[in-house]
Amino acid sequence: MNTQTNSAESMDSTYLAYGQEVKELLNYGTPANFIEELWSIYSDCMAYQKEGGYNPRTSDNFLTFRELVFFFQRVRKLEKEVEG
């Protein structure tokens, strides 16, 4: 029994499932739309923080926001490469 092959096949199916989820997500808008919405959400969050006071998770929120923006930038770049 070759567990390395089974493991590779398992990873492939996992990556395909991730890709399907991304495809489903992109049915709701373009990467540029998602980036714009993320900026809006983050800006609103920062504006609320002035009223709501200190939030110990601010740096975590920023890192999550940043990674999501970077993700959609990479997706947008991939789409442009596929288009030609």
Image (cartoon, rainbow, N blue to C red):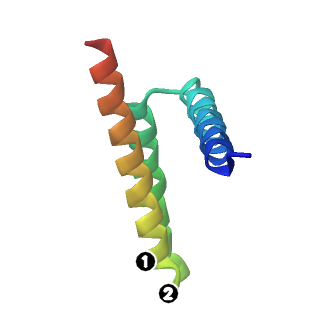
Between 30 and 75, the one lying in front of the other is 75
Picture quadrant where residue 10 is located: top right
Tell me if residue 34 comes above or below residue 55 in the rendering: above
Q: Disc 2 marks which residue?
A: 54
Tell me if residue 49 comes above or below residue 25 in the rendering: below
Which x, y percent locates residue 80? 29, 22
Between 36 and 51, the one lying in front of the other is 36
Crowd rating for badge 1 (residues with CA inside 10 Å; few <14, some 14–19, many 20+): few
Quadrant housing the C terminus:
top left
Which x, y percent locates residue 81? 28, 22
Extreme top residue here? 84
Give the CA distance from mark 1 to mark 2: 11 Å
Crowd rating for badge 2 (residues with CA inside 10 Å; few <14, some 14–19, many 20+): few
Extreme front residue here? 1
Extreme right residue here? 1
Tell me the mark number nearer the camera, choosing from 1 and 2: 1
**Residue at the location (74% across, 46% down)?**
1
State if disc 2 and disc 1 touch (CB < 8 Å).
no
Q: Disc 1 marks which residue?
A: 59
Between 18 and 40, the one lying in front of the other is 18
Picture quadrant where residue 82 is located: top left
Kind of element beneath mark 1: helix
